Amino acid sequence: MEGSILKRTGLAVIKGELFSILINTIGLILLAILMTYSTIAETAIPILVIAINTISIFIGTSIATINLQKNGILNGVLIGIIYIVIYFIISLVTGNINTLNPKLILLVTLGIIAGAIGGIIGINLHKK
């Protein structure tokens, strides 16, 4: 029984990561199209990227935790942290982040909060 719960939780975390990455990719493509055909200030781009990442984590954790029966906050935070770590590693490899800055701290904080809230919402959607 314990193995089944662990397996289901692990699959939910993987599902959450995949949904978050997919939603983030779609969001960033839409942002790139919007930037091409509008006059968005370059200073707004980092904030928009943080918003897209936060929304991606929120939706991904909500979808992932719908089929779980408990620990929505814990699983949501776990999905958020893993997502941020993956994002940070990719950013380091591509050279987009080279120092610890306030925007990175904001991204980490919002990622954890969005994961926790998404996990709560996902668990509550399951009960309906």
Image (cartoon, grey):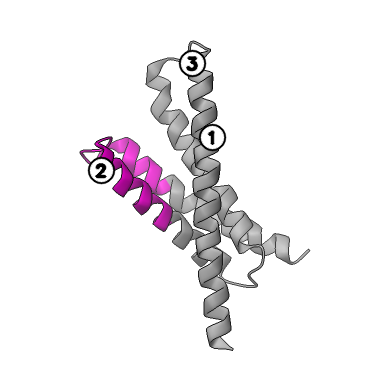
Q: Are the residues tagged 1 and 3 within 8 Å (C-beta)?
A: no
Element type at marker 2? Answer: helix
Q: Is residue 76 above or below residue 10?
A: above
Q: What residue range appears in magenta?
A: 81-109
For the stretch drawn in magenta, the main secondary structure is helix
Q: Are the residues tagged 1 and 2 within 8 Å (C-beta)?
A: no
Residue under the point 23% across and 41% down: 100
Q: Which mark is residue 27?
A: 1
Which class describes the residues within 10 Å of circle 2: few (<14), some (14-19), or many (20+)?
few
Element type at marker 1? Answer: helix
Kind of residue at badge 1: Gly
Which class describes the residues within 10 Å of circle 1: few (<14), some (14-19), or many (20+)?
some
Mark 1 / mark 2, whichever is N-terminal: 1
From the image, tell me which residue sits under label 3. Answer: 36
Q: Which mark is residue 92?
A: 2
Disc 1 versus disc 2: distance between alpha carbons? 21 Å
